[in-house]
Amino acid sequence: MLMIKFDADDWMKRTEKVRKELPKVGKKMMAAVFSRIRRDVRTNIRANFKRDTGFLYKNINYYAFEDFGGMITTMDGKSEEKRKITFYASFLEHGFSVSPKGDGYLTIPHKKGGVFAGFRKERSFTVPPRPFFEPVVNDWFSGRGGKAERLMDEILQKEINKYVEKRGTGAPALRD
């Protein structure tokens, strides 16, 4: 007859340690996901914009919170100057139209063959959307088993293993 002894008190102590550490684990999980998203957004910026986008590139920031939440933003909340510089990110993402007040015209620089050829007058102009942020976020969080979920599962499993492992036996895997 095989006898298995289960130490419920020891198990409760170890699982209590995990419960107390969950806020830190949540912050670590979100920070890992957001740092990867930031990397991909920056890659997207470099690939899709020909003009200098240094301020936008440098100001893709993320903030991870202990409640398993956070945000990724194109603005640095710490600096008024940087907030003013990167406000154009939403215009690039969604596109925009410009028209003059009243019935006037806009004077727009005109290029031919990449060379300045004077100015022209227009009633309005539209800059088409050039999404660089939302496609990356959608890619990371889309559907069941998205990249973000897999990365968070991996980090959570490592944290659980730290607190639950005992004498070479690991914690049960989160996924089958």
Image (spheres, helix red, strand yellow):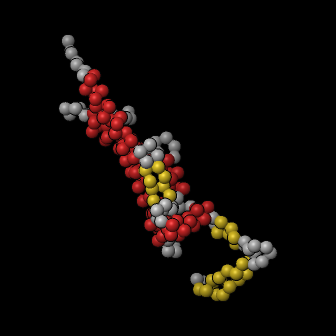
- Residue located at (38% from left, 35% from top): 175
Question: Tag count in the figure?
Answer: 0
**Horizontal side of residue 142 vs 124, given as left or right:** left
Residue found at the far right of this picture: 103
Residue found at the far top of this picture: 1
Q: Is residue 59 visible?
A: yes
- Residue located at (35% from left, 34% from top): 19
Front residue of 45/86: it is 86
Q: Is residue 33 visible?
A: no
Quadrant location of the N terminus in the rendered image: top left
Query: Where 9 sits versus 118, above or below?
Result: above
Query: Where 128 sits versus 176, above or below?
Result: below
Q: List x then y, in percent, for residue 150.
A: 41, 44
- Residue located at (46% from left, 46% from top): 69
**Horizontal side of residue 31 vs 17, given as left or right:** right
Front residue of 34/68: it is 68
Quadrant location of the C terminus in the rendered image: top left
Front residue of 151/145: it is 151
Q: List x then y, in percent, for residue 125.
A: 70, 72
Q: List x then y, in percent, for residue 117.
A: 64, 87
Q: List x then y, in percent, for residue 38.
A: 44, 58
**Horizontal side of residue 163 vs 128, given as left or right:** left
- Residue located at (41% from left, 45% from top): 66
